[in-house]
Amino acid sequence: MPRKEQEFNGVIKTSYLDSTPWWKEEDKAPAGAPNVLYIVLDDTGYSQIGCYGSGIATPCIDSIAAEGLRYNDFHVNAMCSPTRASLLTGCNNHTVGDGYLTNYDLGFPPLSGNVNPKYGYISETLLENGYSTFAVGKWHLCNQKHMNGAGPFNQWPLGRGFEKFYGFLNAATSQYHPDLVCDNHSVDPPKSPEEGYHLSCDLVDKAIGYIGDQKSCYPEKPFFCYLAFGAMHAPHHAPKAYIDRYKGKFDEGWDVYREKVFARQKELGIIPENTVLTDHNYLAPAWDSLTEKQKKVFPKFMEVFAGYLTYTDEQIGRLLEFLKKIKQYDNTLIVFLSDNGASGEGGPEGCFSEYYHLMSMRWADLISDEDLELIGTEEAANHYPRGWGWAGNTPLKMYKTWIHAGGIKVPLIIRYPGRIKDKGGIRTQYHHAIDINRTVLDICGIQQPDIIKGVKQAEKPGMSMMYTFDDPAAPRQRHVQYYEMLGNRGIWADGWKAVADHVISRSFEEDKWELYHTDEDFSEAHDLADKYPEKLKDLIDLWWHEAGKFGVLPMLESYYKKMDGFDFNKALKFAPSESRSRYTFYPQMSPNSLSPRLANKSFVITAYVSHKKGCDGALVAAGDNMGGYALYIKNNKLVFDLNYLAEKHFHQESNVEVPGGDITLGFEFVVTKPDQGVGRLLINGKPVGDVAIKAYPLFSGGKFAIGRYAFAPIAKEMKSKDFFRYQGILDRVEINMERPTDDMDLMLEIEREHNSQ
């Protein structure tokens, strides 16, 4: 338990030499408490790790399993933020406020995206019990509006019990041009892709550095390292040599691949012998039904994914070797897991940009031969076709965001030589991410504190899994677990599971529930709803009970929804709107702030500069090469470029050169109809070029930078080693949305100018 504040126990006299000193006793971890290492992969399906049957090489992860335990019935929350919230708090995700992605506070307790301090993180508990703590990699546990250089930082890692942080805050980032944060400030990557940069390698370098610092200074003090890779979330990025290792390995297609994985799983004993390989779902067509073109294109996507995973596995291996080198490996408790099942977000054809569907609400068309050669590189943000996601969850149904087993059943490996004797063993007891917290504290000999940072702690429903360590046949101790994600619902109770696929339903009242006897049907292949209607009713009633107990409602809709006219982005109707209409930005601002919401708004961007001929560079830029906008100077011409999801560019260059001296440079835009508008470039307030734009949503830009771009360049001609920094003097950039949106004279003038060219 954390110590109470200790009162001074020495003697103070007038003279220092006559006084008696006293030193406060430092918090110490319990004797023999191990180091703790969490390794979290993203969007990694049940069968995508070698020791769970995969055809992808993961020898380093497999080595952890060979010395520890694999769990074949472990569950998470079907999406990243919700699982991470449960993993770090030991509480159900809706209870703590992460019923959906943490990016937005949607105005309801389970959808706030803010974890209340009464649900303390394990990092906070370990820190108060003598541990050093650091987080490396993906965070995704704070609101998007707070992902900027000014905070607030109370939901960032350093605000939740971690002493150091290096990684990224959002759901995903490029492996070549990541959105990096060190502690509470934005940083640029240490080198470029041309110099061999890759985020997975960088994260392990940083983890090794943190551990090296800690063990050099405090060798007797244990550490907690939370290592959460961007892998295997899209964009799927990997060095070419690793992609080439898998050339031709997936040409037979996902049906044959699933059958091979299924056979290996039975050989490994990771699934029961009576398991049935589930059939195609309504999103995964038979491989034989594809066109010859699709059969040629789709394997390349999987080759990239496989190379990405093997490369990441090698980075994990480097960390393990370092722990062995400093003689800490056998004193480190390792917990390895994925945050949800494999993803179907690449759509039926795969995609060049993972953002395309969510921003456009359209699935991408089949990739061109030219773009196919670019996937896996910094030029792309690719995601494989969902058939490969289905195969990655073999033998289970469905994907990430669904409550069928394919969305929530994932690999879990626990290794700790001092406590686990059954090396390479398999455990079949049903458990959930909320159980990891209690398990780790039990192993470390630490009680869950009643108070953290002065805040009374709420009850945690997670339970210890230590009872499974010694006896593979020990009766399970978890008996009920509810689930909900984007309207998909499920409840498991003592070997029976009811689940509703809300994506294909028009309303919650019309949802058709399925029933599975999971003790006998591991893969949920046989729907028993018609055979046992009373059992199904009891489970549905139990779901409603648990939903009330843990604060599930209200439920959102899925971005896979099939209803006519449904638009996921517009369905988030309570998302906070833009709070300001005028902004002033300075070039000293961190380049990781969010851009103002300019979608479907008329506005004026004005940059105040002191310019000299030859001083090219970005004035304002939002987003990256997969979508965004930029106002910049190139070859002494003023340029505006709107990159619409890497599908097309709306590009305009001024018809005169930028003059020298103290001037204003701008871009003026007027909405002419929803999702469409006209704009023009301005020098000293006078028009010098125009552009017509038709795209949805207009001007969604993501991360924002002044005087440079933040990540990969929005337009290829902007690319430079120094992020295309403006070489002149940039005083400030103003964005004004107060101008009237019905300025017909201006609209007509701009349209006349545009049509005359």
Image (cartoon, rainbow, N blue to C red):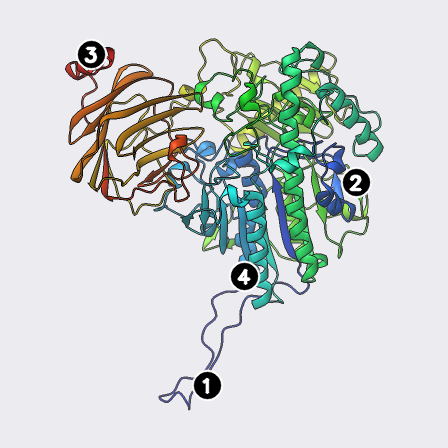
- Which one is in front in this view, the residue at disc 2 or the one at disc 4? 2
Going by the image, does 661 lie left or right of 387?
left
Separation (CA) of disc 3 from disc 4: 72 Å
Q: Is 648 above or below relative to 633?
A: above
- Lower sequence index among marks 2 and 1: 1
- Which one is in front in this view, the residue at disc 2 or the one at disc 1? 2
Q: Is 428 above or below relative to 515?
A: below
Q: Are marks 3 and 4 in contact (CB under 8 Å)?
A: no
Q: Which residue is mark 1?
A: 20
Q: Is 553 above or below relative to 460?
A: above
Separation (CA) of disc 3 from disc 2: 72 Å
Who is closer to the viewer here, 599 or 579?
599
Residue appearing at x 64%, y 45% in the figure:
436
- Lower sequence index among marks 3 and 4: 4
Q: Which mark is residue 426?
A: 2
Rate crowding at label 4 as few (under 14), some (14 to 19) or many (20 or more) other CA atoms within 10 Å.
Answer: some
**Image x and y of residue 290, in percent:** 66, 11
Separation (CA) of disc 2 from disc 1: 58 Å
Q: Which residue is mark 4?
A: 2
Separation (CA) of disc 4 from disc 1: 26 Å
Rate crowding at label 3 as few (under 14), some (14 to 19) or many (20 or more) other CA atoms within 10 Å.
Answer: few
At mark 4, the secondary structure is loop
Residue appearing at x 45%, y 73% in the figure:
7
